[in-house]
Image: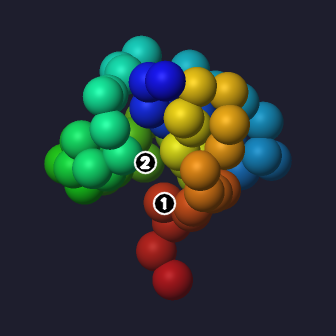
Amino acid sequence: MAFRWRYLDAAGEPVDGPDETFDDQGQAEQWFGDAWEELRIDGVDAVVLLDGDDEVYGPMSLQEG
């Protein structure tokens, strides 16, 4: 399976975001570590990590506090 991120707005509804896929969880998390601030600026409120169609974890808020 491929790892990818699902992007959510403040209401928990899916929104568009980068269509990146990763071979493993570590690669996905490393990419997210570099991209999360830009995602937040672009209106993403939270993310869910997926392995194929299975949720690995989340939603994880991008908001401070």
Neighbour class for label 1 at 10 Å: few (<14), some, many (≥20)? some
> The residue tagged with tag 2: helix, strand or loop?
helix
57 in relation to 51, above or below: below
Is residue 20 rendered to the left or right of residue 1? left
For the point 56% across and 62% down, the residue is 61
**Residue that badge 1 annotates:** 62
Q: Position of residue 38 (x, y in %)?
A: 30, 42
Farthest bottom residue? 65
Q: Which residue occupies the foreground of this view, 21 or 32?
A: 21
For the point 36% across and 46% down, the residue is 25
Q: Position of residue 58 (x, y in %)?
A: 63, 57
Is residue 13 rendered to the left or right of residue 42? right
51 in relation to 46, above or below: above
Q: Residue 31 falls in which quadrant of the image? A: top left
**Residue that badge 2 annotates:** 40
For the point 58% across and 25% down, the residue is 52
